[in-house]
Amino acid sequence: MNDKINYAFFVDLFKDTVGYESGMLKTLKDLLRKPDIILKSLNSGENTYVKPTKFFLSFCGYFILVNSFFIDWSEVGKRHDADFNAMFDAEGGYTNFSFLMDLLFSKVFVPVTMFFCIVKLLLVLKLSKKLDVSVRDHIAIVFYTASLGTIFTFAVGLTLAFLPFIYGMAINLLAIFIIFLAPKKFIQLKSADSFLPEAGKELLKIHKKADLILGFIIMAVVIFYVLIGEKYFAL
């Protein structure tokens, strides 16, 4: 009897955690196949899919839980430092994977992603004043696409954490090719126009412009840290 109770408890816990019964998996599945259907369902008031902000925050929570409590990224990075140096015969070299991995996966990815989601949403709203797209639709597109990016980064992290350096890098390069460069018949991170086909190229241009602006902001922050910040804020 106790075994059955314990089994049922862990099954229910698993279902609640991954969102098996709350629509998380269905939302993820349809995001990869037909995101426009999700947007139409949300606008019609149906509760078939998980709302974009909740979906995004849920995966951010999974990301933090796994990367902060179950994976020691400092140790993973040190292992990859050694593998990289051995592979390229860099005697005494220092690739600094340990610092970068620990910083990215354990500390900065989720808060930075949340910040840039808000900034991107503000940019998109400002750039699309003449476009007949509701604020609700823009919110959905920004947070759903950010969710897919978070899931992709989560998968990247797991392969780097548990596979040898050469295999982890090879899998991630292949994944990047399939998602960003391969023909549309492959599963890929969805672009803005796949959510609202009727808005088409204009909506896509606006989101690309917002991404470009954010890219320049990221580059500026990185350059500032490399040229100035590292000297004064070295860890």
Image (cartoon, rainbow, N blue to C red):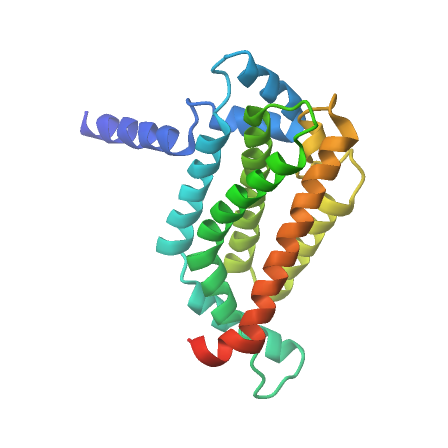
Q: Residue furthest right?
A: 183
Q: Residue furthest bottom?
A: 91
Between 208 and 100, which is closer to the camera in this rendering? 208
Can residue 82 be seen in this snapshot?
no
Relative height, residue 74 to residue 46 (above, below): below
Observer able to see residue 127: yes
Residue 140 vs residue 210, the one in the foreground: 210
- Counting from the top left corner in percent of width and height, residue 85 is at 60, 79
Q: Position of residue 42 (x, y in %)?
A: 54, 18
The residue drawn where x is 56% and y is 29% is 140
150 vs 200, nearest the viewer: 200
Image side of residue 144 versus residue 190, left or right: left
- Count the marks: how many? 0
Judged left or right of residue 126, residue 225 is left
Residue 50: x %, y % from top left: 48, 25
5 sits left or right of 30 in the view: left
Identify which residue is drawn at 57% across, 74% down: 226
| In the foreground, 119 or 195 | 119
Q: Residue at x 49, y 48 (%)?
A: 115
Q: Residue at x 66, y 47 (%)?
A: 211
Assign the N terminus to one quadrant of the image.
top left
The quarter of the image holding the C terminus is bottom left
Q: Position of residue 133 (x, y in %)?
A: 65, 24
Q: Classify 154 as above or below 162.
A: above
